[in-house]
Amino acid sequence: MKVLRARNEEGASDYCACVTFHEQNNSPGNPFTGGAAGRRETTGQARLIIALLVVLIVVVATVGAWLIWGRGGDDDSATSPAAVSTTAVPETESEAQPEIDSVALLENAGVQSVNPAPVPESVKAWGDYVKNRSWSGMLRVFEGQDATPVTNDDHSRFPASMNHCGVAMYLVTFRSVNENVRLDAELLNAANNIDASLTLSDGWILTTNCDTPQFRFNSSTDISNLGDVAYDVTEYRQSSVANPVAPEAESAEEPAASVAEPAASVAEPYVVECLQGVPGPAQWSDGTVAYAEECANTPEAQQSIRAEGLCGGLYAPEDVSREEFEAICNRAPVYPPEDAS
């Protein structure tokens, strides 16, 4: 420290102030203008703060990366099974839906029946029946009007009759073109009676050759007062009366024979009862009415044949006694005039 003498008291004051200021500025404990020790302490504190900041940044970055990538990976792994199961649902549903056994549906259906979905396919053979022909068509029904029948393949009357019921079977699949229109699907017999009826928009019918399928407008959920019905008809005939297969179609019909083979184990229809009237008609176990030889040889049948020969004329035959004629014809005999005496 440099000391200057004061020349006078005023100068001495100035000196003291100057010395004090200088000493304070050069004090070792001043961190700004002090000595080397102060500067070293300041530098160490700055480095410590910087190091702490770096460590803090690294920790924050590590935690953030774990939150983003670590948990995101866990979420993906947790949700990935759900995604796999979601994509697998359609396969599970498709596997859960059983295939339609068309042959079983046809064999288990009623002889004259109207049925809802599922709809069987037009198979080549089922039971004792073989596919003979098929055709498609469309008809229109009107609100408040009579039913509209299904027609033949040439648009003539449907091939229904009163005889040999069951010699042919018809599978009719149908649907309402307008899904809002509901139909009355019916089976009409030769006596104009309804054998079966069901209200629906689509389905299928199985009937013999003694009923005519027809449709009637039932209701509509919109403003429609008419509807169109699209239908497909498949005619089946008993294998013994089916039309011969064309030579070029024999190879195509071979699989049908293999399909029909299991039907051999099905019991043959049998006579349930002989019907009264003309000898021969019988009610069979499959629901059909057809000729049976055994019903033509019963005592009742022979008596009926005998009655036709005795009672059909105006006069009683000469070789028949009065007692026999009255027992068979339930009336007194009338003989020709020349034999009346």
Image: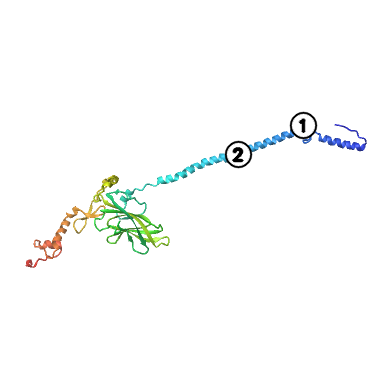
Residue situated furthest right in the rendering? 8
Dividing the picture into quadrants, the one containing residue 291 is bottom left
Q: Secondary structure at mark 1?
A: helix
Q: Is residue 10 visible?
A: yes
**Viewer-nearest residue: 78 or 137:** 137
Disc 1, disc 2: CB below 8 Å? Answer: no
Q: Is residue 110 visible?
A: no
The amino acid beneath tag 1 is: Ala
The kind of residue tagged 2 is Val
Label annotation for residue 244: none
In this orientation, which residue lies closer to the viewer: 170 or 56? 170
Q: Is residue 333 above or below residue 234?
A: below
Q: Give the quarter of the figure containing the N terminus.
A: top right
User: What residue is drawn where x is 60% and y is 39%?
Assistant: 63
Cα separation, mark 1 vs mark 2, equals: 41 Å
Identify the residue at image location x=12%, y=61%: 324
- State the image coordinates of residue 260 (x, y, percent, origin top left): 28, 46
- Tell me if mark 2 has few (under 14), some (14-19) or many (20+) residues whose alpha carbon lies within 10 angstroms of its own: few
Dot 1 or dot 2, earlier in sequence: 1
- For disc 2, the marked residue is 63
- Picture coordinates of residue 177, whole percent (x, y): 39, 57
Q: Which residue is mark 1?
A: 36
Say whether residue 78 is left or right of residue 102.
right
Q: Nearer the viewer, mark 1 or mark 2?
A: 1
Residue 210, position as x, y percentages in the image: 27, 57
